[in-house]
């Protein structure tokens, strides 16, 4: 390929994004790894992808682009595992998400991210280890509230998978149900988040080639991670899920508290 064609290809891939080609490659690799982790453990990949994107892209584009990537990853996972979805929790969660996204679209520029990070991190720790959520399965009202709160928070924090995961885990009897249901719920939230940012005027156009690469790599990572999940013993999955939730919640708490110091 001639130098002119190489330059044209590079301009097509990264033009207008502020990235170099290595940044493009790194983000595609992390998209694969994040989707693999999410499909095999149920969550964790979203924050990995967001942390990487945050080091390579401006903060103003981070959350909307991350939403597109996570939509692709979760939709692929939901599609592959659709037979394991707990469908009864979807309608109340959807209604709550619509309300939360509408409110979040109006507040997106007015609330400090640090407050939401601290609240989210604290809630995840309680929801993971607290006696109420472990003893009782959450009902439709809980999923309605979860949809509203999650849609509001995701406009500011981005990766709110750890907020939804404890509810999916408490409602499920097996690991496949946890991962599949979590994927559907996050697909709903990321879809409405993208719509909200579009209505707020965010221009996705220059990032379409980058997003295409990230989505393809994410789908391949999901496919590989799904097979890892099927071979993983149930008790190991539950332990790893709690470990990941704990680590991510502590990371959110650290980020929120350090933002004030």
Image: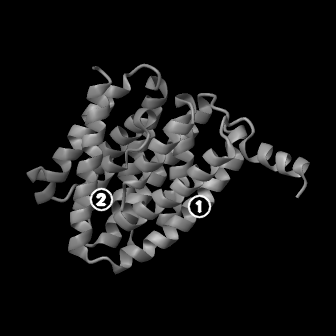
The spot of residue 116 in percent (x, y) is 32, 31
Which residue is at the front of the view, 113 or 139?
Answer: 113
The spot of residue 226 in percent (x, y) is 44, 72
Q: Residue at x 37, y 27 (%)?
A: 113
Q: Residue at x 23, y 66 (%)?
A: 238
Q: Mark 2 or mark 1: which comes first in sequence? A: 2
Image quadrant where one finds the C terminus: top left
Q: Locate residue 100 relative to residue 24 in the image: left or right.
A: left
Q: Residue furthest bottom?
A: 231
Q: Which mark is residue 68?
A: none
SS at mark 1 in the image: helix
Which residue is at the front of the view, 80 or 235?
Answer: 235
- Whether residue 87 is visible to the viewer of this picture, yes or no, is no
Q: Looking at the rendering, which quadrant does residue 241 occupy? A: bottom left
SS at mark 2 in the image: helix
Q: Which residue is mark 2?
A: 168
Q: CA distance from mark 2 to mark 1?
A: 26 Å
Front disc: 2 or 1: 1
Q: Residue at x 57, y 41 (%)?
A: 65
Specify the color scheme.
Answer: one colour
Work out whether 147 lies above or below 1: above
The spot of residue 191 in percent (x, y) is 53, 47
Q: Which residue is mark 1?
A: 217
Q: Locate residue 98 relative to residue 56 in the image: left or right.
A: left
- Whether residue 8 is visible to the viewer of this picture, yes or no, is yes
> Around disc 2, counting alpha carbons within 10 Å, would you say few (fewer than 14), some (14 to 19), or many (20 or more)?
many
Which residue is at the front of the view, 89 or 135?
Answer: 135
> Around disc 1, counting alpha carbons within 10 Å, would you say few (fewer than 14), some (14 to 19), or many (20 or more)?
many
Image quadrant where one finds the N terminus: bottom right
């Amino acid at each position: 390929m001639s130098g002119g064609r190489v330059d044209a290809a590079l301009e097509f891939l990264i033009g207008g994004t502020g990235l170099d080609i290595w940044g493009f490659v790194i983000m595609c690799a992390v998209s694969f790894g994040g989707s693999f982790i999410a499909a095999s453990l149920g969550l964790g990949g979203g924050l990995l992808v967001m942390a990487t994107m945050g080091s390579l892209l401006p903060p103003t584009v981070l959350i909307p682009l991350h939403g597109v990537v996570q939509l692709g990853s979760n939709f692929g996972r939901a599609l592959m595992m659709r037979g394991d979805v707990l469908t009864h929790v979807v309608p109340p969660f959807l209604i709550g998400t619509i309300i939360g996204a509408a409110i979040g679209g109006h507040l997106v520029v007015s609330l400090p991210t640090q407050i939401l990070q601290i609240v989210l991190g604290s809630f995840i720790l309680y929801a993971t280890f607290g006696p109420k959520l472990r003893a009782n399965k959450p009902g439709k009202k809980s999923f309605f509230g979860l949809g509203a709160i999650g849609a509001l928070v995701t406009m500011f924090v981005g990766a709110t998978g750890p907020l939804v995961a404890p509810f999916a885990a408490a409602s499920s009897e097996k690991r496949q149900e946890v991962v599949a249901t979590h994927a559907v719920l996050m697909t709903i939230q990321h879809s409405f988040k993208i719509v909200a940012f579009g209505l707020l005027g965010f221009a996705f156009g220059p990032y379409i080639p980058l997003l295409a690469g990230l989505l393809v790599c994410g789908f391949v990572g999901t496919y590989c991670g799904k097979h890892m999940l099927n071979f993983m013993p149930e008790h190991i999955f539950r332990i790893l899920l709690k470990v990941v939730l704990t680590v991510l919640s502590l990371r959110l708490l650290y980020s929120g508290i350090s933002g004030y110091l």
